[in-house]
Amino acid sequence: MKERNEQLFYIGTYASREERGIYIGALHTDNGDLRMVGGVEGIERPSFLALHPNGAELYAASETEPGQLYTYQVNTQTGELHTMDRKGTEGAHTCYVSVTTDGQYVLASNYSGGNAVVFPATEAGGLGDMSGQVQHTGSGIRQDRQDAPHPHSIIPDPSGQYAMVCDLGLDQIIVYRLTEDGKLVTHRETDLPPGSGPRHLVFHPSGRYAFVANELNNTVTVFGYNERNGKLTLLQSLSTLPEGIIDVENTAADIRITPCGRFLYVSNRGHNSIVLYHVDLDSGKLKTIEWVETFGSTPRNFNILSGYLLVANQEGNNVVSFAIHGDDGRLTRTGYVLEVPSPVCIEPVR
């Protein structure tokens, strides 16, 4: 049960089906304290979570072969989850799930399957039959990581007209038009430098810019975005690592922006840090400000809620809270840690 001055959140993990897979945590909004509230078993490797805009359904990507999408009914008072539905994604290792801003469609990408899919969200709260699917083909220059397509995320744009698929294997962001009947129609392709490995993308609150975390070459790329035609225009590329770091094996992971649009963060797995950038609101360009240790190994995912940043350290087996300074976005460790086996996703309860 949520107490006064608490914000509930879900934690996705790499648990087996027999273990607790999704945890419910609570963040104390006065000091950043963390506590465990509950959770559910019966889902294997729920590595990414997305809440419906109405707050009443949670979707979980089961990163298995074959991949699956689970739907849970949310008790908005307690955060308690009840399984409603389960659908196959017709691809291996479902690694990402998102929901259009109008709540009409649920999108998912299959890392090993090389495909992205669309399901309509039903009025009853479950998922209808798959309405759209696209299959990627090709490869990149790195045979160890880019021997095939690897769609690592699918993100609807703010207008709901387009969906952006970051394909780590192809070094491309493929823009699809999302039709009224839930189909994905290829609209345009945006190439990144060979060996970039685009992973996750986030839009600026204004809708004028998009920022991409590139896993393989440890960069963040800034694009101008034209909502009318779905076009991404390259503006800038910066490293996610401090200058001179050469002896650390690192892969960039997650990317988030504050609701005010002034502060952007990216997580580094290996360097085990969060890098803060200031966003120029007039140009969209970034200025690197600082790196903060995550106090746990392999920060695969993190999220921003109630003035705090929560980091899921996959191999550190913990979730760590940081206070976000409102004037400059800098992070201060609160000292509070929640022990969780292999946490890989944080999703706030609305």
Image: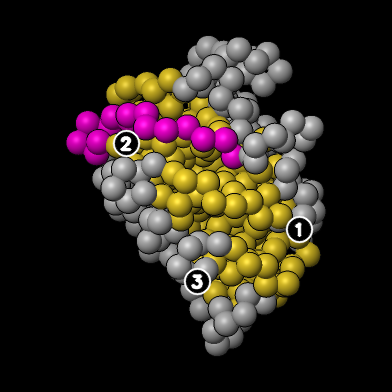
Identify the mark at residue 214; answer none if there is no mark.
Answer: none
Report the residue marked by disc 3.
306
Name the residue located 48 percent from the left edge and 63 percent from the top edge: 328
Magenta stretch contains residue 30: no
Q: Main secondary structure of the magenta part?
A: strand
On screen, residue 295 above or below 239: below
* Image coordinates for residue 9, horizontal then vertical, percent: 58, 66
* Image coordinates for residue 101, horizontal then vertical, percent: 33, 52
Q: Amino acid at mark 1?
A: Phe
User: N-terminal of the two: label 1 or label 3?
Assistant: 1
Report the residue marked by disc 1.
295
* Image coordinates for residue 170, horizontal then vertical, percent: 52, 19
Query: Horizontally, is 285 left or right of 22 in the view?
Result: left
Residue 118 visible to an observer of this rendering: no
Residue at mark 2 to residue at mark 1: CA–CA distance: 34 Å
Mark 3: secondary structure: loop
